[in-house]
């Protein structure tokens, strides 16, 4: 046993964050969580091409084909619906 009490901040969580992005320039990017592996289900269908998601607002961003913006980043579209997220491992 440890001498320090377990508080909500020190307990490991088994639920992903409300918002997460794969873009390293985003403020919602977290490499450690992405490396752990996150599964996304959008309207009952598991998606593997999600660039960013927000559970509380109910949207995901996915690449719009092979189109790129002027800086070489993929163009994304925002899809609204029911979002579920979980850790794969």
Image: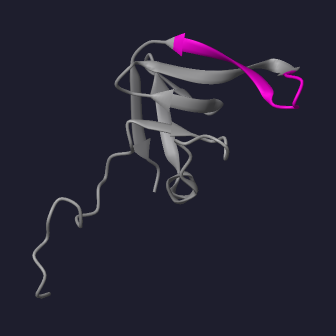
Quadrant in which the C terminus appears: bottom left
> Which of the 4 image quarters holds residue 64?
top right
Left or right of 77 in this view: 15: left
Q: Nearer the viewer, residue 43 or 26?
A: 26
Q: Residue 36 at what x, y percent from top left?
A: 51, 57
Left or right of 45 in this view: 76: right
Residue 43 vs 12, above or below: the answer is: above
Magenta region, residue range:
68-79
Residue at point 89%, 24% (across, down): 70
Residue at point 31%, 53% (across, down): 14
Residue at point 63%, 42% (across, down): 22
- Give the tally of numbered discs: 0
Residue 4 vs 6, above or below: the answer is: below
Q: How is the image coloured?
A: one colour
Residue at point 63%, 32% (across, down): 51
Q: Residue 1 at what x, y percent from top left?
A: 12, 88
**Residue 74 is one of the magenta-drawn residues:** yes
Q: Residue 52 at what x, y percent from top left?
A: 57, 31
Q: Residue 50 at what x, y percent from top left?
A: 61, 30
Residue 34 vs 66, above or below: the answer is: below
**Residue 46 is one of the magenta-drawn residues:** no
Left or right of 55 in this view: 38: right
């Amino acid at each position: 046993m440890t001498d320090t009490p377990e508080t909500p901040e020190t307990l490991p969580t088994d639920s992903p964050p409300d918002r997460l992005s794969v873009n390293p320039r985003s403020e919602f990017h977290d490499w450690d969580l992405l490396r752990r592996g996150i599964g996304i289900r959008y309207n009952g269908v598991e998606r593997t091409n999600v660039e960013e998601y927000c559970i509380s607002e109910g949207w995901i961003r996915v690449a719009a084909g092979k189109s790129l913006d002027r800086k070489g980043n993929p163009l994304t579209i925002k899809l609204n619906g029911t979002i579920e997220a979980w850790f794969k491992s």
